Image: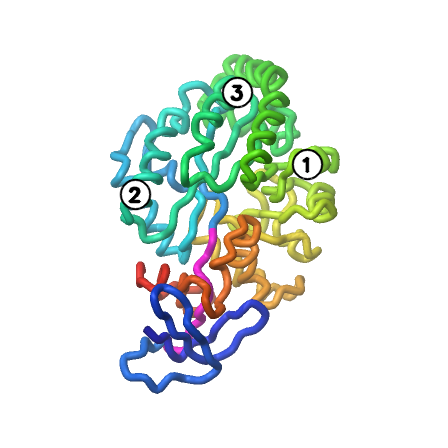
Amino acid sequence: MIINNVKLILENEVVSGSLEIRDGMIRTFAETQSSQPGAHDGDGGWLLPGLIELHTDNLDKFFTPRPKVDWPAHSAMSSHDALMVASGITTVLDAVAIGDVRDGGDRLENLEKMINAVEETQKRGLNRAEHRLHLRCELPHHTTLPLFEKLVSREPVTLVSLMDHSPGQRQYASYEKYRDYYQGKYHLTNEQMDAFEQEQLALAARWSQPNRLAIAAHCRERHLPLASHDDATREHVVESHQLGSVIAEFPTTFAAAEASREHGMSILMGAPNIVRGGSHSGNVAAHKLAQLGLLDVLSSDYYPASLLDAAFRIAVNEENDFTLPQAIRLVTKNPAQALNLSDRGVIGEGKRADLVLAHHKGDHVHIDHVWRQGTRVF
């Protein structure tokens, strides 16, 4: 198959031309138009590598579309997968939470169902995107380590992250913001919130550090990429680096981002943060880190369509030095490198034909078609 009349977003430049796919791989590309009959006319659109998503919570929404509503697993998985490819994402790490900030939370109840759905649909070739697993380990919980040890050997597991959402820690260094978020989330009275906060502090004191050390050791032994989460201080980053973290997810301050760069960690920030112009929880804005050159990877987090949108926004923002190819690398090559996936993430001969064709429609980047390994999936 030939895709003709496109602007190819290569690793370091944009060229107008055409691209040929054979046996699911990019056979060749050229800065000329093809004269072959039957070539797909890209109508002058952007042709870029398929997007690679390292951390999305989107699957949760389909398994529990409303509180106390459990949706059939394969239907939920199919809907989630459709949204991924419609957003240009061809490789996705579905983040599932191990341990929870509250016993009986939907995430714990759905954990086995979600993991089984990802694993089974991928093995059976039912998914349009390639789905893998990201184990998000909520450290202040007694079930976290046993669950991790049970799940870490599952085939789709590709990334592990360590997080601590207890009061006074990292994202919730402010007790006031912690109370505002969880009191609203769980509809607690002031008295109930006081008890919940004390319970979480006790759990963190008992479990966070032992779980952190044990899970990191497992990852080093298995050569599984490890990510820190919401580091707020240089001390947090030093600890994360010593444990073997290669990705710094959502550092909450400039100091933590700078320290992550100094220690050779890939800095991952949320694409919604770029689209909205700042963090919804009041932490450092991703566009500010971009301006300082402290941004390596974007994740759609809770809103899949934000990924490509954010990359193009970074490219047109005159306050930073990102070219369009550099901005696209935030959602393609860089996340692939962070996971040692050398077969994708760039337009190059012999690479997987995971591709996105998009056009600007006014101020919006509209996705026309998506291919995974040469097969059109959108």
The percent position of residue 216, horizontal first and vertical second, equals 60, 31
138 vs 368: above or below: above
Q: Is residue 347 magenta?
A: no
Q: CA distance from mark 1 to mark 2?
A: 37 Å
Describe the colour scheme in one phrase. Answer: rainbow
**Placement of the N terminus among the 4 image quadrants:** bottom left
User: Which one is earlier in the sequence, the residue at label 2 or at label 3?
Assistant: 2
Query: Which residue position holds label 1?
Result: 232
Check disc 1: other Cα within 10 Å, few if <14, some if 14-19, many if 20+. many
Q: CA distance from mark 2 to mark 3?
A: 30 Å
Q: CA distance from mark 3 to mark 1?
A: 21 Å
User: Which one is earlier in the sequence, the residue at label 1 or at label 2?
Assistant: 2
Q: Residue at x 73, y 47 (%)?
A: 258
**Placement of the C terminus among the 4 image quadrants:** bottom left
Query: Is the residue under label 2 in contact with that under label 1 (CB below 8 Å)?
Result: no
Most extreme residue toward the front is 221
Q: Which one is nearer the viewer's eye here, 337 or 291?
A: 337
Q: Residue at x 47, y 39 (%)?
A: 134
Horizontal side, residue 295 vs residue 21: left or right: right
The percent position of residue 294, horizontal first and vertical second, equals 67, 52
Most extreme residue toward the bottom is 35
Check disc 2: other Cα within 10 Å, few if <14, some if 14-19, many if 20+. some
Query: Which residue position holds label 3?
Result: 141
Q: Which residues are magenta?
A: 42-52
